[in-house]
Image: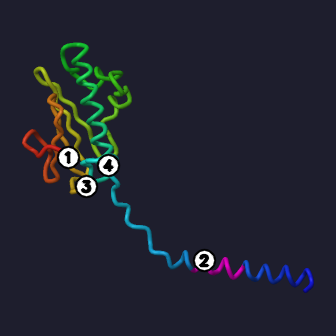
Amino acid sequence: MSRRRIQRFCAGILAVGMMGAGLLLAQAPAQPSSQYQPKFPGDPARSESEAQALGYMRVVLRAQREYKRRHSKYADSLEGLAGTGSFTKRMAHTTDRGDYTASFRPHYEGFVLTLTPKQLDSEHRSFYAEEDGAIHADDQKPADLDSPKVK
């Protein structure tokens, strides 16, 4: 066989292999829907948006515990809490948290933190927390102290 025929033969085999690979890829099942993947064992979030909202709440609650340990009282604003723990000035000034809006309200010897979704549904629950650190959630109405606790 001449060198030219060998090259054509190899090119033909390569082309057939590439077509076969293309057919296999075309017949592969579609990727599953973008279902939420828990971030840690026992993660109570139902969506990426909820995971981010709950993460924000946990950062605020930890910062409030640290603030109270240092000052014997809770911060009376998110701005006052900035720089405590991993809570930043940017987190204090931005109430728009993606699919959620954050709200902070001080009260006598405590505070109320809420995250309200822009669209309330089973994957965008509302959240509520006070100085006790328990996070409550509701997918029917704005969460409050009587809403079920997040596990």
Q: In the image, residue 11 lies at what x, y percent? A: 78, 79
Q: Are marks 4 and 3 in contact (CB under 8 Å)?
A: yes
The residue depicted at 27 percent of the width and 53 percent of the height is 46
Q: Is residue 30 left or right of residue 14?
A: left
Q: Amino acid at mark 1?
A: Ser
CA separation in Å, label 4 and label 1: 11 Å
Picture quadrant of residue 80: top left
Task: Say which residue appears at 32% left-offset and 29% top-offset.
Answer: 92
Residue with the most extreme left position: 146
Q: How is the image coloured?
A: rainbow
Helix, strand or loop status at disc 2: helix
> Where does residue 63 sit, x and y in percent of width and height?
28, 25
For image coordinates 37% across by 65% down, the residue present is 33
Q: Which residue is mark 2?
A: 22
Residue assigned mark 4? 49
Look at 37% across and 27% down and name the residue there.
88
Whether label 4 touches label 2, CB < 8 Å: no
**Of marks 2 and 1, the one in the foreground:** 2
Q: Quadrant of residue 135?
A: top left
Circle 1 is placed at which residue position? 126
Give neighbour class at mark 1: few <14, some 14-19, many 20+ (Cα, 10 Å): many
Q: Quadrant of the N terminus?
A: bottom right
Residue 139 part of the magenta-drawn span: no
Q: Which residue is mark 3?
A: 123
Q: Earlier in the sequence, mark 4 or mark 1?
A: 4
Q: Residues within 10 Å of mark 3 (few under 14, many from 20)?
A: some
Q: CA distance from mark 1 to mark 3?
A: 10 Å
Secondary structure state at the residue bearing disc 4: helix
Question: In whole angstroms, how far apart are the C-alphas of marks 2 and 3?
Answer: 37 Å
CB-based contact (under 8 Å), mark 1 and mark 3? no
Task: Name the one closer to the observer, 76 or 46.
Answer: 46
Residues in magenta, as a range: 15-23
